[in-house]
Amino acid sequence: MEARTPPSVLQNHSHQAQERRVSSSTPNQVQEPSHPIEPAMGWRIFRWLSSIVFKIHICLVAVLVIVLTVLGLRSASKTHHFHPKEWYPPLLASIGSSGIIAFSWQAFTGCSPSMAFKTAFWFSPVLSLASGVFFVIVGSRGGLAAGVILIVSSLIVSVYVCWINHRLNYAIQLLSLSTKYPPTNTPIFVFGSILIGVLYAAFVVIGIGGATSITSSFKALFIAAILLSLTWTLQVIKNVVHVTISRIKYFNLAWGREKDIRAAFYDIIKHSAGTISLGSAIIPFISFIHGSARAMRLVAGDSDEFLFSCAPCYSELASMLRNHGNRWGFVHVGVYNKGIVQASYDTWEAFEKVDLEIVIDSDLTVSFCVLCGVSGGAICSIISGIWALVIHKSYATELAIYAFLIGYFVCRIGMAWPQACVSAYYVAYADNPLHPRFDSTVPDRIRELRRRLQV
């Protein structure tokens, strides 16, 4: 299956791109891998263990869900303090809605990246605020806590949108450029991934309902374990989509070749499943640490107060972790079959060689995908919460919280492919910035940010 290559990228800008490239950059002679590169023996063993752990955890969670479901139904028939007919329908309906919302977001992004980008940044705070107000209206202690968090978050995001408004045009331009010619059959592949995520979420919430109905002192532990498994599994599904699409896009950008999406998916599952499982577990924590370090730096500024004395050390730790574990490394995981640590390190080193890290640090693609997820989660929480509020008020808070989490992660699966396209574009550019397939968009952005730093 051949994908179309943008003629404007191949012809109109090839000569201009070479003249305008950053003078200090030198092209890397990137060789196309004829077969998957085998990492060191130690990493192969670790990757195999990660894959085994993930598979065993899926089996254990499946057994736990089945056992809790049986115990819950027995308990409900005897005690009548849990009502399955009132607990399950609102949550299952919101899970189904999450799939529809996720597919709608990815289709909207594919058809009109500019409108999708602006919609996510301007409407996500509104939907978060609406969800927070609903939680406050419910009035329970958990609802008040969730409501306050969502309302404060919506206000923070509103301020953030105003703060980064000047960066939207470049982010939209790059998203449009990188997603203009997606791999063939991308919607079908994404739809299948969303469907798997929805079915898995629907399966595990049955176990959550069973745990809710029993009187065991361990039921909170059971629910936490199921939610943790749900989070990890949906992250793995998202990153499988990310690695598969970024592999195809990188092949097209770096070597002008197009791989069949089914063949790419098979290669990823065969060679990189363990790496993706591990990366899905550690990279969210590293991203959180790096994000909190950036926030601390912004708050601290040049202050010498004791309260912020740890900010430089924390920032250095975050940078070190970021260099050895970042989402951009998933591109090299798919293309070269590297381990996530080596792939992340090599990718960031390539960014630094071409001065691309200043662009990466101001990238808004992840913020766009996160806000799409937040908006999806907010809609799902409102659907589930209002339904539960009408038929059984005491269930409203917990069902709305579960619906928000599931809606967020399912929507992130749908938005994995545009994020993968942008990642592949940046990594392919960093590996060979003088390639004629790249126009002047990124070099112009680098020069603009350099000028701002010098002011």
Image (cartoon, rainbow, N blue to C red):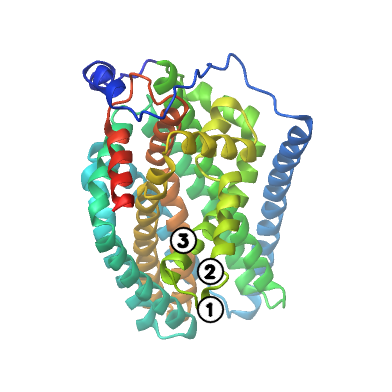
Identify the residue shown where x is 32% and y is 35%.
442
The answer to which of marks 1 and 2 sits earlier in the sequence is 2
In-image side of 455 versus 152 (left or right):
left
Task: Measuring from the top left, give residue 121's x and y in whole percent.
Answer: 28, 57
Work out whether residue 203 can be spotted.
no
Identify the residue shown where x is 43% and y is 21%.
254
Task: Measuring from the top left, give residue 67's x and y in whole percent.
Answer: 71, 60
* Label 2 environment density (alpha carbons within 10 Å; few <14, some 14–19, many ≥20): some
The mark tally for this picture is 3
Which residue does the numbered mark 2 point to in the structure image?
A: 84
Task: Measuring from the top left, give residue 278's x and y in whole percent.
Answer: 65, 45
Which residue does the numbered mark 1 point to in the structure image?
A: 307
Which residue does the numbered mark 3 point to in the structure image?
A: 294
In-image side of 359 versus 39 (left or right):
left
Disc 1 vs disc 3: which is toward the camera?
Answer: 1
Identify the residue shown where x is 65% and y is 58%.
65
> Distance of mark 1 from mark 3, alpha carbons?
16 Å
